[in-house]
DNA sequence: CGTCATATTGACTTTAGTCAATAGAAGTGG
DNA sequence: CCACTTCTATTGACTAAAGTCAATATGACG
């Protein structure tokens, strides 16, 4: 049942038979959500961490003035709130951006892994570090990229992550975010997102219709965005530098 | 020598005698830097992680167009690039914002801790999670707070962190950042930082002269910033929620 | 004492936000 | 299956926040 974690952590290190067995035997309670539902509430102190099985979800905060900042977007296979294992209560909420299925893994079982498999501790730290690297990239985008480039950049990232998650067909995938949500990802207003998308469309860099994003020429979009994919650590490391 | 880590991780859990001894016996190579020097270069794959002993430092990226985004600011006692233990090469550089002393801990010794002390693995994960929580708060500030509030917010955060690090005297501390650096923290231009500081000064919320920041009334600044300190997890947890 | 870094201010530009009207699409319940 | 509601996207007109450029001051430092 836990293929996603096994597959993902294999990108970091070669898992032993025991380690694979340990990951696969993690128990999970499954639950489904509709678009817009809150999966984990801000301020709660969950005793489980959550793997997204299918659909889409994002982590977000609401400020006192009502504005929202989306902090991360998750594709199937992502451990969405591994950090809640060590840092409670949660400083943000998690919501479903589409009809989604989720698996909940009890924290005590994660603690069990850490006790028995030091290399899996490192894999979990790697997972957290990857999430942090993506957050830094987003932060850079909000702070220093134009709306146009930032949105293009996000689409490049999402295309690659969705590819790894097996969610891309041809050169398109389902984008379960509306323009208000894209705005809250990029620190922009929905109206400005609409205008920026218009430009991207006019230049033929994207086709976005009926919730489906098509990228006719990824290289061109990457060029327009100034995208460098290294931070995603997508490929299996050829060999550990020593 | 490793008091900073012992003290910090005691905020997370009650360390055993052995665990304290293990942290204290971590070897370290010390080195000093001048303001502006690069401590770790972007793209390098260090085999050590770095604890800031004294001074100040920040992590940053430079974009192709020359603009800079500062991703984190560190006070003495911070483990600045714990993530480089699991995620290499580094996606950003680390630079000194003041004359600073740094201790380098070999990654293999960190691996040793993880192998022998599962609870210390969790403490390290907690440290990484805290760093990520601060990054999320900064991201929210860049995306959704006005320049004025964001700068005020940053000063509140820094005041509390500097207090924990024992760097505050009375109600003031040394601010080793110029306006260009403050701008690159907040995603603003130096000129706009200058104007925002002017407003904060005019309202009597801050006194900033000769590299020293005085906060006459922290409550007022917190109010102006809409600051909520929870994400810093500064206090020792009263008791683990169960 | 002179140089370099830093801060301040004014004038002007640009980017993005706000408000509002409209249109279209997608659910929902009878 | 249709009518109704609600959500979502688009566009125009206007506003506001922040950026840029440039001149000048201030200050630290060797």
Image (cartoon, coloured by chain):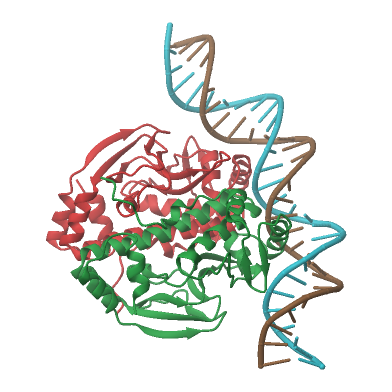
Chain colours: A red, B green, C cyan, D brown
In this picture, residue A93 sits left or right of residue A7: right
Tell me if residue B67 can be seen: no
* Residue D28 occupies quadrant: bottom right
Quadrant location, the N terminus of chain A: top left
The count of marks equals: 0
Question: Left of B8 or right of it: where is B16?
Answer: left
Up the image or down, B49 lies above or below C10; here it is: below
The part of the image, by quadrant, that contains residue A157 is: bottom left
Left or right, A18 with reference to A213: left
- Give whichever of C29, B182 is nearer the camera: B182
Name the residue at 61% across, 46% down: A196
Image height check: is B76 above or below B118? below
Q: Is residue A107 visible?
A: yes
Q: On the picture, is B33 further left or further right than B172?
A: left
Counting from the top left corner in percent of width and height, residue B205 is at 66, 56
Counting from the top left corner in percent of width and height, residue B100 is at 50, 80
Asked which quadrant contains residue B26, the reply is bottom left
Looking at the picture, tell me which residue is in the foreground, B150 or B158.
B158
Of the pair A5 and B100, the residue shown nearer to us = B100
Percent x, y of residue A189: 61, 43
x, y percent for residue B148: 66, 54
The structure residue drawn at horizontal position 48% and vertical position 63%, both measured from the top left corner, is B161
Q: Quadrant of the C terminus of chain A?
A: bottom left
Q: Tell me if residue A182 comes above or below residue B18 in the rendering.
A: above
């Amino acid at each position: 049942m836990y293929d996603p974690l096994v597959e993902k952590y294999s990108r970091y290190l070669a898992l032993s038979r025991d380690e694979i067995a340990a990951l696969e035997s993690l128990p999970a309670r499954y639950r489904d959500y509709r678009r817009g539902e809150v999966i984990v509430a801000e301020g709660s102190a969950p005793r489980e961490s959550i793997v997204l099985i299918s659909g889409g979800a994002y982590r977000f905060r609401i400020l006192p003035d009502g504005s929202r900042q989306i902090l991360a977007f998750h594709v199937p296979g992502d451990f969405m709130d591994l950090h809640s294992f060590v840092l409670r209560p949660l400083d943000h909420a998690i919501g479903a951006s589409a009809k989604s299925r989720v698996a909940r893994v009890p924290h005590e079982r994660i603690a069990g892994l850490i006790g028995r498999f030091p290399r899996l501790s490192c894999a979990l730290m790697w997972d957290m570090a990857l999430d942090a690297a993506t957050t830094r990239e987003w932060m850079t985008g909000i702070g220093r990229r134009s709306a146009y480039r930032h949105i293009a950049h996000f689409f490049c990232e999402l295309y690659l992550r969705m590819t790894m998650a097996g969610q891309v067909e041809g050169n398109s995938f389902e984008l379960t975010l509306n323009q208000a949500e894209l705005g809250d990802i990029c620190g922009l207003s929905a109206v400005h997102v609409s205008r920026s998308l218009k430009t991207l469309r006019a230049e033929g860099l994207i086709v976005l219709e009926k919730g489906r994003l098509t990228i006719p020429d990824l290289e061109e979009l990457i060029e327009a965005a100034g995208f460098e994919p290294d931070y995603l650590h997508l490929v299996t490391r050829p060999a550990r530098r020593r």
